[in-house]
Image: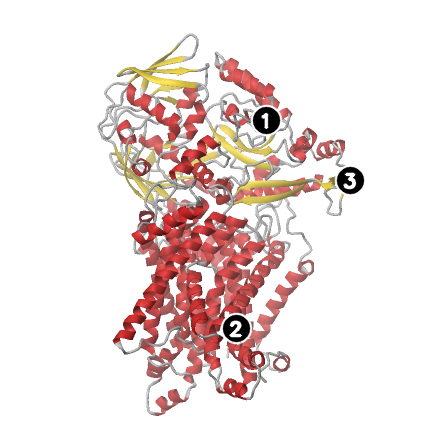
Amino acid sequence: MTTAVQAVPLRAPLARSGVRAARRGLGKLAAAILVLVAAASVTFFAQLLVPGDRATAILNQQTGRAQRWSAADLAPVNHRFGFDRPLLVQYANYVAGLFRGDLGTSYTQHRPVTEVIGDELVPSLVLTVAALVTAWVIALAVILLTAKRNRFVSAIGSTWEALTASLPPYWIGVVLLVVFAVELRIFPVIGGTGAPGTVLPVLALAIPLAGFLGQVTRDEFEKVLDQPFVITARTRGMSDTAVRLRHALRHSVLPAITLSGWALGALLSGAVIAENVFGRPGIGQVLVVAVNTRDVPTVSGIVLVVAGVYVIANLIVDLAYTLIDPRLRAS
Amino acid sequence: MSRFGIPRLAAAGGSALLLSTLLAGCGADATASAGDTKVQGGTIVYGHEQEPPCLYGGWVQQAYLDRNILDSLVTEADDGSIKPWLATGWKVSDDRKSYTFTLKSGVKFTDGTALDAQAVADNFAYWEKGGNSTAKVSIDPYFKSAKALDATHLQVDLNKPYLPLLTMLTQAYFGIQSPTALKRSEKENCEQPIGSGAFQVKEWKHGQEVVLVKNPDYTSWPETAKHQGPAIVDQVVWKFLNDPVGRYASLSTGETNVIYDVPTVNWKDAQSKYDVQQYITPGKPVSIYLNTIKSVFTDKLVRQAFAYGADRKAAVQAAFHGVIPYEGNPSVSQATPGYDAGVATAYSYDAAKANQLLDQAGWTARNAGGYRTKDGKELAIRFAYPAGSVFTSEGSTVLQILQQQWKQVGFNVTLIPETQAETFAGKYSTADSYDAQPWYWTSPSSAILWIVWRPSTGAEPNYSNSSFYNNDELSTVIQQGNSAATTEEANKLYGQAQQIIQDNAAAVGLYTQTTSLAVAKNLHDVWLEKSQGEPVFADAYFTK
Amino acid sequence: MTALSLAPAALRLRVRPATALSLLIVALLVVAVLAPGVLTSRSPNEIDLQHTLLSPSLSHPFGTDDAGRDLYTRVVYGARESFGIGLGATALAMVIAVLLGFTAGLARGIVDTVLTRILEVAFAFPVLLLALLLIAIRGPSLATEIVAVGIGSAPGYARMVRGQVLHVRQAGYIQSSVALGHTWWAVIRQHLFPNAMRPLVAMLTLAVGQSIVWASGLAFLGLGVAPPSPEWGALLDAGRVSITTSPWLEIMPGLVIVLATLALTALGRTLQHRLEGAAR
């Protein structure tokens, strides 16, 4: 009996009945909204746990100081942002605003949070998605080329994966920056948002992730290549490449697809580092500054956006499952 | 089924060697050809560091930007004297409580509003009402009112004579904004302050850069300007590059023409390839406040032992690779008018003296860790410092070196790096939260002494007095200095104040805050403003 | 046969060179954690302002930093903190993952749905945000970092555990065990847990490695442990500025992190394959 790691989808394939499908769809939507509101609420209250007074933090950030302020200085700030109202009222106002599509106004930038995030969301998404795609391409290429061939080649492949999975993203990022941007001048030092400036940040994030995804998929891949139905395919004359591509790959990517959802979150976190090292705008930076300055609306807004991205990613993952293997079998 | 070949370790080792070689090798430098022909126009790409939350405000990061967008009444020359800018001249009344400024006529803001005396008076009111708390604290409690006598004459009245007034007004915090613009929403004022300066804000790409374009109708340059007329370049792209490696590297690849804050490890390299300028910030240097009311530092002997107990000069020298100067004077930095150099020589490293003072203070016993104890209590120091914002990793190295040295004389110093969140929230601002904490203030005048050392009372607390040091004699001396009739008299009194602070070891000197610029060789006349070290681009031009 | 006992596997005499190497590295790491004095005679905080920024040599295998401290010694002593974070965070993550994953996988209906939703909410908090919030609330410390990295990585592993439980639960031997009248607890302990968790053993060592990498990322953002801690991430953060002038300060700690993670991962995979072999 095998003990293969078999990924199991989180939800059963969509039922055929139209009504049931519609109900399911609505259920999913409701669940998604619940998740979003819950995430934003947790953030809202978590930030209230941060010690210190919010008005003080705002005044200090505006003047670059770190002192206490007199009640006379704090009062107008407290009044302006509604800090003097009861906590539940503040929360209720915030949630009501969410349903209106109003994420509030940044305490420090005096702009709507939607603007604060909107400006810098696209570069982060581009970086994250590109890194995920690149990681997949690298991982798949390495596996297809090196899995279950002669010992030496396989060893190179799995060594490469293990090595790259161990690289701290910013360490490799700084090394890439110095080698390829400063010394060899192939890419710009200041990344910005243009295509040439995106290559190095994407690589810095994609290479370690490729190693990680590769390791997970490789195990599956090699096991699948031993399966009876693959052997049958070979005896029927299918070429090695075709076997790898058409049969083995489909079955072995499932765990890695599950991981991709998680990888998205890890990438968003790693994006801060890439943005820092390569001088690239992005919501990672916005997040760090917002937490430091206790800009509660902005942090909650970012969590909301990230949760939204997850919900969409989950839907895509579900879709990918049903496309790759409409009826999942336990072997 | 994992088959790692022998190559693994060889690969790792080989790549280490390769990496080291590549990284240590000097890349071909990109110093642009520095010919002699002056070029009209062009774009300066400036690599700054920190992005502020708004483009105008009381933080020095905002002053850097505002110096290029706004004009002030007066400016400070390199020798410290006050020179005309928007104010072509001024008269001081006999009782020194009234200043009458004559303003340059015909100046307009970039939105068309006239820059007349009423506009300036409106700005004073705006600052006092909270529009710029740093501006306010620089002139309180001396400032009484500002009123326009006619279109070109402004009268500023004070409650008491205040000799540093003009020097304070040279700071970019006192840049004049259009009163029409000030009536706009907070968001617009945050994003795009309107002034009469050499440049105006075209757009702000958050997280990336601010684009400044030339003001073609510029007529009000200061007397210290290096050329007459509007800016020579067409625009300045003010980029925010936080990472020091990337920022310095961008200069070598030509992606920037001038950068801020050269990393000290690259200083020698920068001096060989670019024009490097260093500005020592006047005001309070980075010095260590000692909690005088609620810690082991209530005892003056212990404070003095702390000052003698570590080689601060050597630590600063080593950690900053000789680039940033040591400052023995804890209250006023060497670039400030009124600085007393004699005060700075006190408390040079003397471990024997420190030990003797601690013995004298009763800390004679030692515990198992080697730290001194008295009545069962350990000589423990909570040393909180703002990591990341004020203290770079090099600054942190200074503290680590000092920590080891203080250990030798028996202090158990615990370093507590404050995150920005904690710093802004004021977590380490109360007397219960720390024993020692370093900080700095920028100010073009020794009047900073009043801001920092004014005794804190219940009715009027002084939250800037982070040593919680209330000394009435000190207070009197500083106030006399502020209201003195001549600079010589003022400096003598300020010197006395610095001596009092040093004698009582209310704070311990460390190093000066500095600004540095590295400019590509084909860019000329980028200079650092005297009052706060802001980079000025109004006179800059390229050559080819 | 299904027990997670290592003894029979380890007695096999055929050990590959790569595995031996990994064992050696991990052994060195363990020595560094438990008895650093064996590997170096210096103290990690010993400053020497006369010998700053020396490049690697016989007396200073990794060179010295700008306070004259021996980098090799600092790396050795840093193992304790970095490993501590790695192990602590992974242990925390696994405990949470097993609790959540098993509960969700075994329970049905509403409990499973609710837990899955909670996991999705948890996913909305990238590790970074959690770390930022936790550190903002509690201040930076070893404990906060462990908790932050542990809680942040738990949802991913919880999902995997849940998947495994759902899969193994349908297996024939489980059904027959239940039909034979064994208590649920006995079934879990003897069949479900080992079979569900065995494929994830490699994940454990991988997780330790990833936690170490993540902790060093936090130090990069200035959220690390207080100085003069020689935690590897802190060393990387401090060495970054000097990468072109004194590259060993950045290269050496980075290499150590890579090698340590690599060895842990290799060992984990070997262990898993042996266990799976033993289970067949």
Q: Is residue A158 visible?
A: no
In depth, the one of C238 and A51 nearer the eye is: A51
> Relative to B322, does residue B499 appear above or below in the rendering?
above
Q: Amino acid at mark 1?
A: Ala
> Relative to C59, does residue A137 appear above or below in the rendering?
below
Give how far apart the Cα atoms at labels 3 and 2 are.
53 Å
Q: Is residue A220 left or right of residue B113?
A: right
The reply to whether label 3 and label 2 mark residues of one chain is no
Report in which chain the residue with disc 1 lies. Answer: B
Dot 1 lies on which element? helix
Give how far apart the Cα atoms at labels 3 and 1 are.
32 Å
Q: Give coordinates of residue A24: x percent, y percent.
A: 32, 71
Q: Is residue B394 left or right of residue A18?
A: right
Q: How would you rate the neighbour count of disc 1 (Cα within 10 Å): few for under 14, some for 14-19, many for 20 or more?
A: many
Read off the residue under disc 2: C202
Report in which chain the residue with disc 3 lies. Answer: B
Q: Amino acid at mark 3?
A: Ala
Q: Residue at coordinates 54% horizontally, 69% vertically from top-left?
A: C205
Q: Residue at coordinates 37% horizontally, 26% vertically from top-left?
A: B174
Does the CB distance between marks 3 and 2 fall below 8 Å? no
Read off the residue under disc 1: B344
In depth, the one of C27 and A96 nearer the eye is: A96
Does the CB distance between marks 2 and 1 fall below 8 Å? no
Of badges 3 and 1, the one in the foreground is 3
**Quarter the C terminus of chain A occupies:** bottom left
The reply to whether label 3 and label 1 mark residues of one chain is yes
Q: Give coordinates of residue B410: x percent, y percent.
A: 71, 40
Q: Is residue B515 left or right of residue B205?
A: right
Q: Give coordinates of residue C25: x percent, y percent.
A: 60, 67
> Relative to B283, does residue B50 appear above or below in the rendering?
below
Q: Is residue A71 visible?
A: yes
